[in-house]
Image: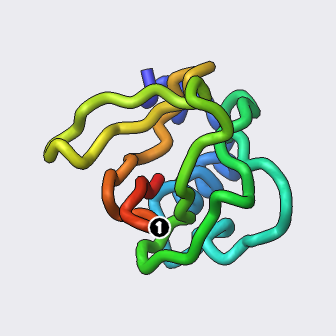
Amino acid sequence: KMRQRFRSKTKKQKKIFLTMFCGINRGEHYKDHFENGTYVCSECSHPLFKSMSKFEHSSPWPAFSETVSSDSVTKKQDGPPTTLKVRCAKCDNGLGHEFIGDGPNGGSRF
């Protein structure tokens, strides 16, 4: 399913997707972006994270402490008990992981 969506993108869209979500060439656009607003799914524009929940972290990707609402994403166990695979609740786009205990004050990091 994800491969089909990727194949249907233009060459420019594929490059942006890979840069944003895979950290190719350290080109992640939103890691150091802290302007007020809402981060949305790149596939369907579903609201995922508020800028107020964004924090600095050593990972190469943006880090958030919570989602916009409890039903913004779906979560599935992925490896250790403290790691959950996270997807957009509206279109099932893969968003990465939630790391329980790796966020501010021992909370979550998305």
Residue positioned most to the front: 105
Residue, disc 1: 104
Q: Tell me, what colour scheme is on the image?
A: rainbow
The quarter holding residue 42 reads: top right
The quarter holding residue 53 reads: bottom right
Q: Position of residue 37 (x, y in %)?
A: 84, 54
Residue shown at 59% from the left, 48% from the top: 14
Q: Position of residue 46 (x, y in %)?
A: 72, 30
Please state if 86 lies on the left or on the right of 18 as rendered.
left
Residue 18 shows up from this direction: yes
Residue positioned most to the right: 36
Q: Position of residue 97 (x, y in %)?
A: 38, 47
Q: Position of residue 50 (x, y in %)?
A: 72, 50
Is residue 5 placed above or below 84 in the rendered structure?
A: above
- Residue type beneath disc 1: Pro
Q: Which of these two is toward me, 80 or 92? A: 80
Residue 7 shows up from this direction: no
Q: Which of these two is toward me, 101 or 38? A: 101
Q: Quadrant of the N terminus?
A: top left
